[in-house]
C-alpha cells in the first residue's frame, strides 16, 4: 500500500547522525592498529557459496545450523550472506594464490556480517566487525601480536573495563586424546536428541550449553587444557610469555568455547564488564585445518573479529565518547546571494586546508541561522553580509565563550 511507512528489518544495527560519528570513530580506531602492524586491506563479497560456510565454519555450530541467511539466487545456486569473515578470507587467499608469496599473508577487513539470531541489546542480525587474518606461519609470537593489535584498538577507543580471556585448544593430537575421554564422559549423561547430535559432531560444544543442568553436568567434564601435548603446551606458554612481555593482562579460561568450529591452539575473547549477556567485544584464535578443509594447502593461520557495534556500546557505557568530539571548525551564515557566493569560496578554500566548514543554506533569517549554528556545535561562527564582503573583515565568534574578534577573511585559516 502506498504511503505506509517502512521500517528497517528486525534486528539490524544502523547508525544515523549524530551517533554515526561515534560509530565511525570506533571503527577507525579499531582499524588503525592493524595498519600500523602492516596488515593490508582485503575487500570481499558479503555473499558466498553456502558450501564455504558449512565446510569452513562447521555444521555443529549455531551459526551454520540455525543462523545463516541462505537463499537460492536466480541461477539456482545456494548463496549465504557471510556470517563471519575468516572463511571468505581463506577462500580468497586460495583463489588468488596469495599463499604462494611471502608468508604470513596479513590482511584486515571491516564490514557487515549477518546472523539470524534472536535480536537483543548488542546482538543483531546485521552487525559490523573489524577483523584481521595472519596466514601461513605457526609462530606463537604472531598469536601474541594479533592479540596485542586487538587490545590496542580497544585501548585507542578509551576502553578499560574489559578483560582478555585466553586458552589453548591444542593441536590435533592433543584434541584427539581429550576427545576420547570427553566422549566417554558425555556418554554417561542423558542428552536430548538435538544435543546428542551436536555432541557427536563436536563434543566441545557442550561446554557452551547455557542451560543450568548442562552447565552443572559439564562442570566435571575433562578439560582440553589438561590434555595438551608438549608441543601445544610449549606454544601456549610462549604466547603467555610474549603477552606478559608486552604488559597485556589476561586470564586463562579453559572452558572457553568459541562459536565457530575451525579453532585450534590459541583462542581468545575480549569480554566487557558493562554489557550484560552480550559481553564479547571481540574474539579469535588459530585455525590449523581450515585452509586444507577449503581445498588449499595445509597452512596454519590466526586472526580476530572485533564487534564494532558492541565496542560502541561499551564506549558509551564507560562514558569515554565525548559529545563534543565531533564538531565543525566554522559555521558560515551568508546574508543574501553575493554573500552565498563568497561563503562557498571561503568554505572551499578552508576545506582544502583540512578545516571542517558548514554553511547555512536556504536563506534563513539571521536568528534561525544562529540557532542552526548553535545546534551544529561548530566551534566558530561568522555572519557574511554586504558590509563584511566590502570590508573584507568578519566578526569571528567563539560559540562557547561568546568572545568575538575582527578577522580578515584572508586570515580566517590562521584564526581557526
Ligand atoms: P565471533 O566471535 O563469532 O568470531 O565474532 C567476533 C565478534 O563479533 C564478537 O566478539 C562480537 O563482538 C561480534 N558479534 C558476533 N555476533 C554478533 C551479533 N549477532 N551482533 C553483534 N555483534 C556480534 C568471528 O566471527 C571470527 N571470524 C573471528 C576470527 C577471525 N577468528 C579468527 N579469525
Image (spheres, grey):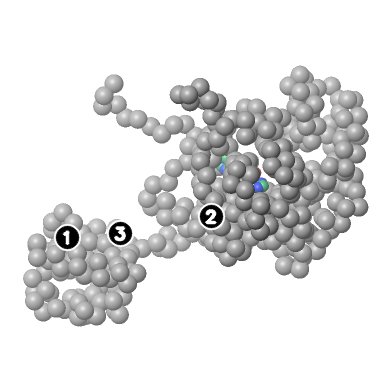
Q: Mark 1: few, some, or many residues within 10 Å (few <14, many ≥20)?
A: few
The CA span between labels 1 and 3 is: 14 Å
Q: Mark 2: few, some, or many residues within 10 Å (few <14, many ≥20)?
A: some
Whether residue 157 is visible: no
Where does label 1 land, which residue? 367
Report the residue at 20% width, 59% height from top.
Answer: 360
Find residue 149 and report its image quarter. bottom right
Q: Mark 3: few, some, or many residues within 10 Å (few <14, many ≥20)?
A: some
The x and y percentages for residue 139 are 77, 58
**Mark closer to the observer (1, 3):** 3
Where does label 2 land, which residue? 41
The x and y percentages for residue 200 are 80, 26
Along the polypeptide, which appears first: circle 2 or circle 1? 2
- 59 on left or right of 237: left
Find residue 86 and report its image quarter. top right
Report the residue at 52% width, 44% height from top.
Answer: 44
Where does label 3 land, which residue? 376
Label 2 secondary element: strand
Amino acid at each position: 500500500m502506498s504511503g505506509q511507512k517502512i521500517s528497517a528489518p528486525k534486528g539490524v544495527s544502523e547508525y544515523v547522525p549524530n551517533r554515526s560519528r561515534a560509530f565511525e570513530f570506533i571503527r577507525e580506531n579499531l582499524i588503525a592498529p592493524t595498519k600500523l602492524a602492516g596488515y593490508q586491506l582485503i575487500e570481499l563479497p558479503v555473499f558466498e557459496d553456502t558450501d564455504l560456510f558449512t565446510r569452513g565454519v562447521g555444521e555443529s555450530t549455531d551459526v551454520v545450523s540455525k543462523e545463516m541467511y541462505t537463499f537460492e539466487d536466480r541461477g539456482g545456486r545456494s548463496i549465504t550472506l557471510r556470517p563471519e569473515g575468516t572463511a571468505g578470507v581463506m577462500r580468497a587467499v586460495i583463489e588468488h594464490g596469495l599463499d604462494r608469496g611471502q608468508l604470513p599473508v596479513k590482511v584486515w577487513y571491516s564490514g557487515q556480517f549477518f546472523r539470524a539470531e534472536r535480536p537483543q541489546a548488542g546482538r543483531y542480525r546485521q552487525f559490523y566487525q573489524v577483523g584481521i587474518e595472519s596466514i601461513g606461519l605457526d609462530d606463537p609470537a604472531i598469536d601474541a601480536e594479533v592479540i596485542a593489535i586487538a587490545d590496542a584498538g580497544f585501548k585507542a577507543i578509551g576502553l578499560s573495563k574489559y578483560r582478555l580471556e585466553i586458552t589453548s585448544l591444542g593441536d590435533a593430537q592433543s584434541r584427539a586424546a581429550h576427545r576420547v575421554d570427553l566422549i566417554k564422559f558425555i556418554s554417561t549423561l542423558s542428552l536430548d536428541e538435538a544435543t546428542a547430535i551436536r555432541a557427536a559432531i563436536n563434543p566441545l560444544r557442550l561446554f557452551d550449553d547455557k542451560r543450568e543442568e548442562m552447565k552443572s553436568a559439564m562442570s566435571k567434564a575433562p578439560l582440553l587444557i589438561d590434555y595438551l601435548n608438549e608441543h601445544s603446551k610449549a606454544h601456549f606458554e610462549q604466547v603467555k610469555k610474549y603477552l606478559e612481555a608486552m604488559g597485556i593482562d589476561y586470564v586463562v579460561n579453559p572452558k572457553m568455547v568459541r562459536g565457530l568450529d575451525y579453532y585450534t591452539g590459541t583462542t581468545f575473547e575480549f569480554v566487557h564488564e558493562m554489557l550484560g549477556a552480550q559481553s564479547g567485544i571481540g574474539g579469535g584464535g588459530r585455525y590449523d585445518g581450515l585452509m586444507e578443509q577449503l581445498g588449499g594447502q595445509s597452512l596454519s593461520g590466526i586472526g580476530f573479529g572485533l564487534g564494532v557495534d558492541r565496542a560502541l556500546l561499551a564506549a558509551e557505557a564507560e562514558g569515554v565518547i565525548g559529545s563534543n568530539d565531533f564538531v565543525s571548525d566554522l559555521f558560515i551564515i551568508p546574508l543574501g546571494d553575493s554573500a552565498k557566493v563568497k561563503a562557498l569560496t571561503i568554505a572551499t578554500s578552508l576545506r582544502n586546508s583540512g578545516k571542517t566548514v558548514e554553511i547555512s543554506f536556504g536563506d534563513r533569517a539571521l536568528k534561525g541561522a544562529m540557532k542552526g549554528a548553535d545546534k551544529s556545535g561548530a566551534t566558530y561562527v561568522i555572519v557574511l553580509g554586504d558590509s563584511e564582503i566590502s570590508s573584507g573583515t568578519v566578526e569571528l565568534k567563539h560559540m562557547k565563550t561568546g568572545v568575538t574578534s575582527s578577522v580578515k577573511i584572508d586570515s580566517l585559516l590562521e584564526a581557526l
